[in-house]
Amino acid sequence: MSKKPMILILAAAAVLLFLLPAFSQEDIKQLADPAFGQAQRPAAVFDHDAHNEKAAIDGCLPCHHQGVEEGRFVEGDPVKCADCHEVKTAEGTPLMLAYHKQCEDCHLEKKKGPVTCGECHKRP
Amino acid sequence: MVEIYNFVVGPLAWVGWGIFVVGIIYKLIYMYSLARAKDYSSLDYMSLPFSLRSIFVWSIPFYATNWKRNPAMTVATFLFHICLIAVPVFLLAHVVLWQKFFGITWATLPDQAADYMTLAVIAACVFFGVRRATDLRARYVTSYKDWLILILVASPFVTGFLAYHQIFNYKFMIILHIVSGLAWLALIPFTRLSHMFLGLFTRAYAGSEFGKVRHVKDW
């Protein structure tokens, strides 16, 4: 038996292994951003994929963007919010407000989903 | 839940804050015109330095003779008033809402500290209640209104504490907390709680009379 299929399988496995982190949102069950340092509140419940399926959100834009043009988000790569939003900043949207605005504004608009502190920051 | 929440932080909040602000202004004007009508000369004797002196001196624990009479009561009174004001104003969760609704922020207390200060307010309320029930002189001047006020003052702190710790039904508790807090605000001008503002003027009046007219200390 030639070694070729074996190498191919190993290569495929390696590719998958590298690809996996790209789908890491499947693992997101809650949000506790380390950028805040010592957290004041329990992690926010947010099962990434289940949430978006249940809320019937198609696409990634309502959340992942790279900026705002004419009052609308411009689509961006799904990277960490803290990459662009600082915890303390005089200009632009600070990190905590960015999270709260994004999450709550949609819930208020759809009249569905959590809007008070303890509904998101649930104690275990 | 979203509808109820929208209502209590929307229209109901505007009504609560509106009554509070308009009520305080009305009360101050009313007291001023009453003083003018009844005791016109006293207004001439009002003095800013003596007023401020009296307010300042009475703000120091255990300085005025009255603060030395009952140490436990003095400690409870100071602790109670400081926490009563500082917790709602500097609570992180409240500032988060100011930021979200009006885009303004200021310094906040760590949640842990605010938690202990809330307990201090509740403990002080219990202390005042026990005193009203047991101290003969206090009991004599206590009416059912005093009990209602004590419950009114304590309720936003009790519900806030339970909501923060998510004890009992959280959604019910947080709505109850917002409603009781707004009721608290709206009732300030029309109950003894108005001493929050009028007390300064009472002190200023006493300070002026004793300082400028009688040339003696008022503490």
Image (cartoon, rainbow, N blue to C red):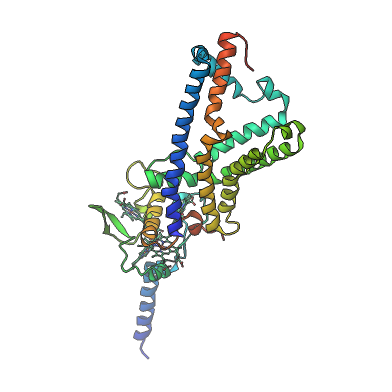
Please report the residue visible at 30 percent of the width from the left and 58 percent of the height from the top.
A65
User: Where is residue B118 shown, x and y percent of the image?
Assistant: 60, 43
User: Where is residue A7 shown, x and y percent of the image?
Assistant: 36, 81
Q: Judge from the rendering whether residue A62 lies leftward or rightward of residue B182; answer left or right.
A: left
Q: Quadrant of residue A8?
A: bottom left
- Say if residue B55 shows up in the picture: no
User: Where is residue B19 shown, x and y percent of the image?
Assistant: 46, 39
In the image, A110 versus A101, the foreground residue is A110
Please report the residue visible at 62 percent of the width from the left and 13 percent of the height from the top.
B217
- Say if residue A62 shows up in the picture: yes
Please report the residue visible at 54 percent of the width from the left and 50 percent of the height from the top.
B177
In the image, A11 versus B114, the foreground residue is B114
* Residue sitting farthest toward the front: B37
Quadrant of the rendering where the C terminus of chain B is positioned: top right
User: Where is residue A17 shown, x and y percent of the image?
Assistant: 40, 72
Q: Quadrant of residue B134?
A: top right
Q: Measured along the vertical axis of the image, is residue A76 above or below residue A56?
A: above
* Residue sitting farthest toward the left: A70
Q: Measured along the vertical axis of the image, is residue A113 above or below residue B56?
A: below
Q: Quadrant of residue B56?
A: top right
Please report the residue visible at 50 percent of the width from the left and 25 percent of the height from the top.
B31
Q: Judge from the rendering whether residue B72 lies leftward or rightward of residue B94; answer left or right.
A: right
